[in-house]
Image: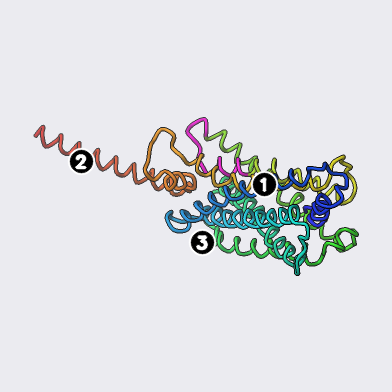
Amino acid sequence: MDFNDTNMTDLHNTTNDNGGYNPDANIHFTGASAVAIALCLFGIVGNVIVFWFLAFRIKRNKYTVYIMNLAIADFIFLLFTALIMMLYINTLIVENSNFTGRNSFYIFLEIFYDTAQYSGMFFLTAISMERCLSVMFPMWYHCNRPKNLSSIVCLVLWFVGCSESLIENLACPPEDFAAQTNVCTGVELMTFTIGVGICLPLMVLCSFALLIRVGRIFQRQYPPKLYIIIIVAVIIFILSVVPFNFIWFLMYFQLLKLDVQYVSIYYASVFSTSLNSTINPYIYFIVGRQWREKSHHSIHDALQRAFKDDEEIQDAKEKSDKTNSSSCRIKSTDEEKRVN
């Protein structure tokens, strides 16, 4: 929910009658749009790298499937955010910025923009829930989890995210949104309930459970990096995305009066949500990196360590123990031969 049609009208006013804006507002908003595009490009590079390594270079597990789809969603979101910012710059610097099919093109951009945003939120919720279930009910989870659950869940979540976006953008066109029709009110209530009423509590509860688990493990050893990645990603999502969902919801129902223009709040939300999608891949790199070791394949190694499953860690420990025990047997046999 982002008041985009209102923002386009406000931006158009900056180039015409300066209604309520500083005379240099078009320059300021153009600069803000350019900075947002640069931020999006920085995030696009990071998400492309993550997708490449997870898809083609690293052994896939149930968690990397979620992260790979999250990287795709973040990539699409940042790409279409950059395109929308380019459209805004065109509106700000070109006198006759209207062109044939402009509104249809804008709705097209919004559909992909919202689909990626909603799907990314769903993927983060899904990986939080699955990691939490594996910690709280390990035996049941290990015995009853379907092998292809991650892929099936991701397909369903893409469908749900796309459906929510289509409903929001097609059932509630800009003129109905401005008039606050019953359909648009229902759509806004639906999106707010799904995002803040369902996904947010699930993410908070699952992250809190993982945080308790990390505290217990940390007393004995360093916790798996995947725990830290999920907790940090959820915290950043809550701090950067959720507040603006509340603000737009309250402003739609005129429950919040702010002495600022809508377009200013919109740009703040663009920077905040873009930062959330941009920073995710760099969280993986930082958490997965071994700071005391230097490697020629640091990105590959960092991602491999970051998303290593508990079962893989346990298998590695068992192999290591077997290797150590066999080497000990060989040494003891050699010592016996020498004595004899």
Secondary element at image label 2? helix
Q: Given this view, does label 3 or label 2 mark the residue nearer the observer?
A: 3
Q: Which residue bears the numbered disc 1?
A: 203
Image coords of residue 304 (percent x, y): 44, 48
Q: Given this view, does label 1 or label 2 mark the residue nearer the observer?
A: 1
Q: Which residues are drawn in magenta? A: 218-233
Instruction: Name the residue: 62% across, 58% down.
Output: 76
The disc label shown at residue 330, or none:
2
Image coords of residue 272 (percent x, y): 69, 44
Q: Quadrant of residue 339?
A: top left
Instruction: Name the residue: 52% across, 32% down.
Output: 218
Question: Is 165 on the left or on the right of 255, as rendered?
Answer: left
**Number of numbered callouts drawn:** 3
Mark with earlier residue (1, 2) = 1
Amino acid type at circle 3 is: Lys
Question: Furthest-left residue in view?
Answer: 340
The disc label shown at residue 233, or none:
none
Question: Is 29 on the left or on the right of 46, as rendered?
Answer: right
Alpha carbon distance from label 3 to label 2: 39 Å
Q: Quarter holding the N terminus?
A: bottom right
